[in-house]
Amino acid sequence: MTETRVSPEGLPQAEVAAPTQGRTGGIERIGFLLCAIYAGWHLYVLNIAPLETWTFRIVHIAGALILGFGMSAAVSVRPAPEEAAARLWGLLGGVALVATLFALGSVIAAAMFMEPGQAAPPEWTLSAFGWALGGGTMLALVTGWLSPARQGQIPLADIALIVATLASCGFILFSLDTLSLRLRAGTPFADGNNGWAAFVIIVLIAEMTRRVAGMALVIIAMVFIAYAFAGPWMPGFLEHKGYDAKRFFTYVFTDNGVLGPTTAVSSTYIILFIIFAAFLQSSKVGDYFVNFAFAAAGRARGGPAKVSVLASGLMGMINGTSAGNVVSTGSLTIPLMKKVGYRPQSAAAIEAAASTGGQIMPPIMGAGAFIMAEITGIPYTELVVAALIPAILYFSSIYFMVDFEASRTGMRGLRSDELPKMAELIRQAYLFLPIVILIGALFTGYSVIRAGTLAIASAAVVSWLTPFRMGPRQVYEALGNGGRMSLQIIIVCACAGLIVGVISLTGVGARFSSLLFELAQQSTLLALIFAMLIAVILGMGMPTTAAYAVAASVVAPGLIEIGIKPLIAHFFVFYFAVVSAITPPVALAAYAGAAIAGSEPMRTSVTSFKVGLAAFIVPFMFFYSPGLLLDAPWYVSLRNLVTALVGVYMLAGAVQGWFIGAAGPVMRILLLVGAVCMISGDWRTDLLGIAIGGSLMLLGWKAGKTTA
């Protein structure tokens, strides 16, 4: 479902695509209603009636799976099959549905016939539960993969998967205390039916991840699962004793894995801020952010590209995925960039790099800050403050890249009649109130959940000062859109939790830490480069939150082991998990931009890597200069900021071949040397870098004056 909006100023607004596709008509309306209920239920539980932690997280995942299977097709919609084939697929789907219904009935019978004080329900109630659940689920999966979906219908196979979700999650909820699941899961004493239920939930999570996020994360998860069983045959530090299936699956579906930090964050902070983003869209406050960016930067040379930098920073911090931000803001900025002279691949690359930067933009940071706070125990407000200077450096670098390219190619900005009027927008500055209230509430001591809820309410209240007043219908639409937009990232976080569980169970993270420690004995820089490569590789093809969660489990402990502070170690990993979205060969944000611009995906990914190059330098900067994370006296942080800005300015000149005029090969090499001098933060190298930059600027100014 795609909606194109038009602002009061007449600028066409970004298209917002639903994360799930394949259902139409009445099914979509019912699905939208359930999404609104799902989002509203989270707000109710988070603010009014808290649930026990495991119960809340299990229902959170179950709801996302049920909605996902109801709203997305297993395969793309194809023409209806021949009658004989349709009967066969229907028969197989029916058999799968009967099997899963039997499993669900077994859980209901166990709950009904278990007497108070008994240690377990009657044996007959669950005697065939596991085989029926596992067999029905696998048959439904295979049937869904092989049979074409029909437009506007939910196949029996998908209905069977919905029932399997109810049966498996229902059994886990029933077993939490009744069968002592909390104590026995992941041990040799785990219940066999618990193993079946956990296995089926993990299979369902993998299938739903495939549908909404593609195969990249699924393949990585399968590799980690295979590693858990193949440990005895692995070489070197990868070797471990191996685990049987029952112990493995019951372990990873606990708070050590799927129900751990990633789901803790998705069930609280992530869904809350996705609902916030939906309210900003419904109230048109989000449109105001984009229009403000146009009014502020649209007239400058290459104006739409600079608008992209500002708008993507504002909206990207709320959006949980870089690719999603490209789709939402890029559908507006990319065509305008092409209009003023940017090549299609440059326009797509700039939007991809800017949208990726939104994930490091305080105060929300695409929900990454919340996961970091959950993992490290560092207060959220400290993380937001620490992220400020690195974000300034990243967006400054992209701005310099854009400005140099516009200057080099002689691009113009947009005309005044093509832009919103700044005077009118200033009179509407109250539309920034939801963000102001969010930040103010966070820094005055409110919890993240309460601050986010206040921001949601303020977005609705502020809309009453505009022509787009939010009434009951608009609130319903915002809740439905919020629930629907959250499905992808909830499932992805659950799948990432599976990987985290494998890392915890096998201890491979500790072994990786030992390897990093050995490298650090030779060279700390070498260890950092190795950590960077692992974080980028693990993050390829994954949304930011999942990429960071996985990389933080593998890489961050090793960096801490070699003596790096937890704050620096986790920011180092976080940055490279973020920029994996613009790193070839699997650059999801760049591919999304290429689809809008009509450019070649691989070339676009290379260009986006070049535009976002500063993001690969900044983590090394704040390792050598902790003042960039405000982990130093204010005057040191200020000096580090100024010299780092000079460094990224010279880096942009070296990459674009423009610095006070055209820069030849020698000047570009000198600019690169000067930029590298700024990395260490030592005053001597800083002075050398500034001297190089100042000399080149003087030469360029004199050359330009002579030419004139």
Image: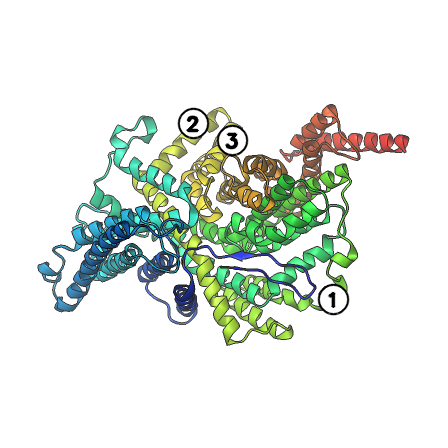
Residue at image mark 2: 518
Mark in the foreground, 2 or 1? 1
Q: Position of residue 438 (x, y in %)?
A: 56, 63
Cα–Cα gap, marks 2 and 1 = 60 Å
Residue at image mark 3: 529
Amino acid type, mark 2: Glu
Residue at image mark 1: 424
Q: Residues within 10 Å of mark 3 (few under 14, many from 20)?
A: few
Residue placed most toward the observer, 187 or 5: 5
Q: Confirm whether residue 257 shows in the render.
A: no
Q: Position of residue 585 (x, y in %)?
A: 50, 34
Q: Residues within 10 Å of mark 1 (few under 14, many from 20)?
A: few
Q: Earlier in the sequence, mark 2 or mark 3?
A: 2
Cα–Cα gap, marks 2 and 3 = 14 Å
Displayed quadrant of residue 237: top left
Label 1: element kind: helix
Identify whether 250 is placed above or below 587. Answer: below
Amino acid type, mark 3: Ile
Mark in the foreground, 3 or 1? 1
Q: Residues within 10 Å of mark 2 (few under 14, many from 20)?
A: some
Identify whether 476 is placed above or below 11. Answer: below
Which residue is drawn at the image coordinates 13% and 54% (left, top)?
Answer: 128
Amino acid type, mark 1: Glu
Q: Confirm whether residue 282 shows in the render.
A: yes
Which residue is drawn at the image coordinates 18% and 53% (left, top)?
Answer: 132
Left or right of residue 140, residue 217 in this image: right
